[in-house]
Amino acid sequence: MNQPPDRTLHWRPGFPVDARLTLSDLRRGHHDPTHRLERDGALWRTALTASGAVSYRIRQQRLDDLLIDAWGPGAAEWVEGAPRELGALDHPEEFRPEHPFLRQALRRLPGLRVPHTGRVLEALVPAIIEQRVVGLDAQAAFTRLVRSHGTTPPGPAPRGMRVPPTAETWMRIPSWDWRRAGVDLHRSRAVIEAARQAARLERAARAGDPDRAYALLASLPGVGRWTSAQVGHRALGDADALPLGDYHLGQATGVALLGRPLADAEIEPFYEPFRPHRYRVIRLIELTPHSAPRHAPRAPRARPLD
């Protein structure tokens, strides 16, 4: 831990930012090797920027005072975009809901913001892996693949962390490794095609053109509205990304806000008045205790092959 950071930032935003809560949306399960919360409260993450790998540590002094350190060839690029990743372009103050559940949730979570990493492939690959399977199985598959095919992070990142694979590496993973991880042929092929298009997707995100990024996502085989929304609220900073098709969305929303589950056909009309904060509503519901189950994709459990 004595290695000095390659870049540092002491960020004092003029608004509340809870880094742990905001970036928890990027975490893919408790064993995600790209995300680690240490006992001292420091949040560690790894990423691949256009400049290369980076590991970064965020220490929260107060909601308006954050110490940020980064290591690796991607450190300068990441630190430049750190405020954006932490939601500096988000505008939760513009959301003024009438429903008492949502008003109370906003008061409880003053530092919650929608992240905007700009890293499309980082969000897209695990979203594809999560399609039509139980979330725990998808998280286990992602963890196994990143541990096997990711790289050692730069700097003094905690032991066991990994940098996500490059697009080229995702394309080269052999079929038996996908099967051992419990990822079927349909999803592995979708990941490989997404990796082939990664450069175009990342250019659209870096250009600040979410419409172009969404259009490119829609053109990919195996990527529908649910998967695009998973990318939108992580990589594109889209507080309106509505994940239609989420298995528990109707129940979680309806129980929290209406006292009864919503039928599938009711979900989109119900959320229409919440534009442009539809995903923000979902996140507030997820993070506020109530009797509905958490959201999770799709269907029967799959067991990885050893």
Image (cartoon, rainbow, N blue to C red):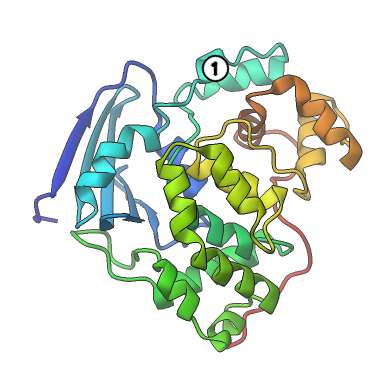
- Image height of 147 relative to 216, above or below: below
Q: Nearer the viewer, residue 299 or 158?
A: 299
Report which residue position mark 1 lands on.
107
Task: Judge from the rendering whether residue 105 lies leftward or rightward of residue 205; answer left or right.
Answer: right
Q: Position of residue 115 (x, y in %)?
A: 46, 37
Q: Amino acid at mark 1?
A: Arg
Q: Nearer the viewer, residue 42 or 39?
A: 42
State the count of labels: 1
Q: Residue at x 51, y 62 (%)?
A: 197
Q: Where is residue 167 drawn, in percent x and y?
A: 43, 67
Tell me if mark 1 has few (under 14), some (14-19) or many (20+) residues whose alpha carbon lies within 10 angstroms of its own. few
* Residue occupying image coordinates x 53% and y 38%: 210
Q: Residue at x 65, y 59 (%)?
A: 135
- Residue 66 percent across, percent down from the top left: 27, 31
Vertical placement of residue 122 versus 186, above or below: above
Residue 28 image position (x, y, % from top left): 52, 56
Picture layout, residue 183 above or below residue 135? below
Between 215 and 134, the one nearer to me in the picture:
215
Element class at badge 1: helix
